[in-house]
Image: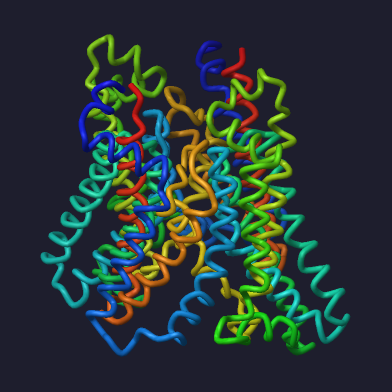
C-alpha cells in the first residue's frame, strides 16, 4: 500500500480507480477523435443521436450487470429475458391488447428473476452458472411457446415504436425512458439503503452478514429487479428493431458485461457504479461503429471484447491490490 | 470389499441408476438394442469428453467456462485441416488439433496464474475469445473429416477371431472414450502430477507450503482440460463429418455431470468414472424422453431443469461441507 501510493504511476492508478469517469470520458473523446480521422463525414448531430439510441438498450442491460456485479455476482440471463419479454409482447398484443401483453411479458421476466434469486440466494449456486442455466431453460420455454402462437401474428405496439425509433428535437425519444431510469438507478445505488447493502455485500459478504444484513433477501430482490430491468429493455429494443425474433437481444449479452467492466465496475463486487457504465456503453457503441468501418469480422469483434474484459479486470486487480 | 463399496458408493449408485434407466428404455422401446446403444454412445461422446476435461480442472480447484468454446475451435480446426486431406495428412491434423487443445488450456491456466484474476472471470473472457477464434477459422458449419476417423466411433466392435455376436453390442464410441481417457488420465493420476492436482484442489496454500509448485500444477490441469476439450471437439466432427463453429450446450451439461458424478465444486475430491457415468445417465434420460415422443423443445426444458437442480443440490452440499 505504501509503495503503491509512493510511486506516481500507482497514485495515478488509484485516482483512476476512485474516479473512473474522468479517464473514461477522455477515452470516449479519443475514440470519437479517431473516428473523425477515419471518416470525417460521419460526425453529425444525426450520428450522435443514433449512437445514443443504440447505446441506450446496451446501457440498460449493463445496469443489470452493474447492480449484480456490485454484490460480486453477474446476470447472464439478461439477453434471454429481454428477448422473451419482447417476443411475448409482440405475439400477445393482437390477442389480449397491449397493456395485458406487456404485463404478461414482464411477469415472465419476474419468474426468471425469482428462479435466479432462489438458486443464488437460497441454494448458493454461483450466479454465473445459475443464470446460464435459467437462460437455457427459458430459451427452451420460448421455443415451445413460439410453436403454439405462430398463427396469431405479430403486433408491435405504437408506443414502443415511438419510444424506440422516434426523435424529438433531434434527440431519440428513448431518452424519455432512459434519463429517469438512469437517475433512479444512480440515486438508488448511492443514496438508498438497498444500494448501500449491495456495496456492503460485495465488499465483504461475511462482514455484511454479521452486521445483520439478510443477504438472501437482498439477493432475491436484486436478481428479480435485474430481470425486470432486462424485460423493460426488451420492450424498448422491440420498438427499436421492429421485428420479433427468437434471438432479438441475445447479441447484447456479452457487450453488456463488457460495458459494465469497462465502466469501472469490479466483477468481484463492492466497487463501481452506473455512471461509469453509461460511459462504458457509449464507448463500446462508438468502438463497434469503428470496427464496422474497419470491416472487422464478427469473430474478431468477440475476441476483442473478451480481451477487453480480461485486460480491464487484470488492471483493476493490480491497481486495487492491497497486499 | 466393504471399504471398496463405502469409498465408491456414489459411483456404484450411478452405475445402478444407469442400468435401471437402460432397462426402462428397453420397456419403453422393446426393440432397443445394438443400434440404440450405438447412437446413445455417439451422442454422449462429446458430452463425456467435455465433462472429463471439466472434471480434471474442477478437481484442481478451478472451473473452465470456455470448455464448449475450445471444443468449437478444435472442431473447426480439425474439419478445415482434414477437408480433402489424405489419411496420412489427417493423422497430422489430429495431432495438430490435440496440441492446439493443450495450448488453449495452458493459455487459460497461465492467464489465471499470471493475472491473478479469478478463474471464473478469466475463462469467461476466454470463452468469448475462443468463440471468436472459432468463427474466424470457419464462419459457417463446413469442412470435412477423414473416413477412418469417423469409423472410429461408429458401429460396434469387431475383433478378428471372436464371433461378432459376442462383441458387436459394445459401441465403438464407448471403447474410444474409455481408451483415450485411460491413456491420458491414468499415467497422470499415477504420477506426481496427479497427486499435486488433487493437492492444490483440496488446499492450495497447504500444497504450496508442502513444496507443490501451485501455479505450474494449475496450468498443467487446465492444459489437460484443454486436451480433453480438443478431443471433444474432434468427436463432434467425427460424429457429424463437419466442423461446427457455434459452441454446443456443453458448458452447463459438463458442470452438471461433474457435480452429479461426485466431484465436489471447490476441488480435491472425486474421480473421472463418476462424471462419465453421470453423462450417460443424463443422455439416457434425454433419449428416453425422445423415445416417449416428447416434443424435443420440452425435452430440452426437462433436461435443463434436471441439470440446474443437480447443480443447486451440489451447491447446497458444498455449502454444508464448508460449514461443517
Q: Quadrant of the C terminus of chain B?
A: top right
- Total numbered labels placed on residues in the image: 0
Q: Nearer the viewer, residue B218 or B4?
A: B218
Q: Residue at x 72, y 65 (%)?
A: B294
Q: Position of residue B85 (x, y in %)?
A: 15, 73
Any part of residue B171 in sight: no
Query: Left or right: where does residue B236 sit relative to residue A173?
Result: left
Any part of residue A194 in sight: yes
Q: Is residue A64 above or below residue A237?
A: above
Q: Position of residue B155 (x, y in %)?
A: 40, 61
Q: Nearer the viewer, residue B221 or A64?
A: A64
Q: Is residue A67 above or below residue A137?
A: above
Q: Is residue A301 above or below residue B192?
A: below
Q: Residue at x 70, y 41 (%)?
A: A192
Q: Position of residue A92 (x, y in %)?
A: 80, 79
Q: Position of residue A5 (x, y in %)?
A: 28, 28
Q: Residue at x 60, y 31 (%)?
A: A200
State the image quarter where residue B191 is shown: top left
Amino acid at each position: 500500500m505504501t509503495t503503491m501510493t509512493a510511486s506516481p504511476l500507482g497514485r495515478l492508478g488509484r485516482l483512476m480507480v476512485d474516479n473512473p469517469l474522468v479517464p473514461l470520458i477522455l477515452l470516449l473523446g479519443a475514440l470519437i477523435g479517431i473516428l473523425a480521422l477515419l471518416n470525417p463525414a460521419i460526425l453529425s448531430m444525426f450520428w450522435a443521436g443514433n449512437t445514443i439510441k443504440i447505446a441506450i438498450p446496451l446501457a440498460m442491460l449493463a445496469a443489470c450487470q452493474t447492480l449484480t456485479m456490485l454484490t460480486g455476482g453477474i446476470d447472464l440471463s439478461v439477453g434471454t429475458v429481454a428477448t422473451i419479454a419482447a417476443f411475448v409482447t409482440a405475439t400477445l398484443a393482437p390477442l389480449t391488447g397491449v397493456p395485458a401483453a406487456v404485463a404478461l411479458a414482464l411477469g415472465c421476466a419476474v419468474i426468471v428473476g425469482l428462479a435466479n434469486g432462489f438458486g443464488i440466494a437460497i441454494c448458493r449456486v454461483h450466479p454465473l452458472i445459475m443464470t446460464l442455466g435459467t437462460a437455457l431453460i427459458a430459451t427452451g420455454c420460448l421455443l415451445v411457446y413460439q410453436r403454439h402462437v405462430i398463427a396469431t401474428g405479430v403486433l408491435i405496439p405504437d408506443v414502443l415504436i415511438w419510444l424506440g425509433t422516434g426523435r424529438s428535437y433531434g434527440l431519440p425519444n428513448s431518452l424519455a425512458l432512459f434519463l429517469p431510469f438512469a437517475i433512479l438507478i444512480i440515486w438508488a445505488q448511492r443514496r438508498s439503503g438497498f444500494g448501500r447493502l449491495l456495496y456492503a455485500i460485495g465488499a465483504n459478504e461475511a462482514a455484511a452478514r454479521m452486521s445483520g444484513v439478510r443477504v438472501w433477501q437482498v439477493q432475491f430482490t436484486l436478481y428479480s429487479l435485474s430481470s425486470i430491468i432486462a424485460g423493460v429493455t426488451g420492450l424498448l429494443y422491440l420498438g427499436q428493431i421492429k421485428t420479433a425474433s427468437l434471438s432479438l437481444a441475445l447479441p447484447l449479452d456479452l457487450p453488456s458485461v463488457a460495458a459494465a467492466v469497462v465502466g469501472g465496475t469490479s466483477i468481484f463486487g463492492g466497487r463501481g457504479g452506473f455512471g461509469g457504465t453509461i460511459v462504458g456503453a457509449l464507448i463500446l457503441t462508438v468502438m463497434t461503429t469503428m470496427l464496422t468501418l474497419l470491416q472487422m469480422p464478427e469473430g474478431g469483434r468477440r475476441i476483442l471484447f473478451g480481451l477487453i474484459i480480461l485486460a480491464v479486470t487484470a488492471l483493476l486487480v493490480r491497481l486495487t491490490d492491497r497486499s | 470389499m466393504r471399504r471398496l463399496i463405502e469409498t465408491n458408493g456414489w459411483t456404484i449408485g450411478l452405475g445402478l441408476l444407469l442400468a435401471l434407466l437402460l432397462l426402462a428404455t428397453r420397456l419403453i422401446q422393446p426393440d432397443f438394442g445394438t443400434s440404440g446403444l450405438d447412437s446413445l454412445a455417439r451422442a454422449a461422446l462429446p458430452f463425456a469428453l467435455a465433462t472429463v476435461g471439466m472434471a480434471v480442472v474442477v478437481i484442481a480447484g478451478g472451473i473452465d467456462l470456455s470448455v464448449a468454446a475450445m471444443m468449437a475451435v478444435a472442431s473447426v480446426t480439425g474439419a478445415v485441416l482434414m477437408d480433402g486431406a489424405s489419411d496420412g495428412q489427417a493423422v497430422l491434423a489430429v495431432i495438430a488439433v490435440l496440441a492446439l487443445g493443450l495450448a488453449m488450456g495452458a493459455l487459460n491456466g497461465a492467464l489465471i496464474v499470471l493475472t491473478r484474476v479469478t478463474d471464473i472471470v478469466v475463462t469467461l473472457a476466454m470463452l468469448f475469445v475462443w468463440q471468436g477464434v472459432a468463427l474466424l477459422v470457419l464462419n459457417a458449419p463446413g469442412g470435412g473429416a477423414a473416413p477412418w476417423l469417423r469409423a472410429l466411433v461408429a458401429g460396434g466392435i469387431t475383433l478378428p477371431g471372436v464371433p461378432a455376436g459376442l462383441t458387436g453390442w459394445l459401441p465403438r464410441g464407448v471403447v474410444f472414450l474409455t481408451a483415450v481417457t485411460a491413456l491420458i488420465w491414468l499415467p497422470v493420476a499415477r504420477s506426481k502430477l496427479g497427486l499435486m492436482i488433487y493437492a492444490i484442489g483440496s488446499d492450495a496454500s497447504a500444497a504450496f507450503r508442502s513444496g507443490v509448485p501451485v501455479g505450474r500444477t494449475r496450468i498443467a490441469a487446465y492444459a489437460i482440460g484443454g486436451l480433453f476439450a480438443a478431443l471433444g471437439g474432434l468427436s463432434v466432427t467425427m460424429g457429424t463429418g463437419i466442423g461446427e463453429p457455434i459452441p454446443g450446450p456443453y458448458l452447463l451439461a459438463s458442470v452438471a455431470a461433474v457435480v452429479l458424478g461426485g466431484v465436489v465444486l471447490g476441488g480435491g475430491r472425486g474421480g473421472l468414472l463418476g462424471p462419465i457415468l453421470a453423462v450417460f445417465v443424463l443422455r439416457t434420460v434425454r433419449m428416453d424422453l425422445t423415445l416417449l415422443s416428447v416434443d424435443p423443445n420440452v425435452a430440452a426444458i426437462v433436461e435443463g431443469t434436471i441439470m440446474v437442480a443437480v447443480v443447486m443440490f451440489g451447491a447446497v452440499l458444498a455449502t454444508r461441507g464448508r460449514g461443517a
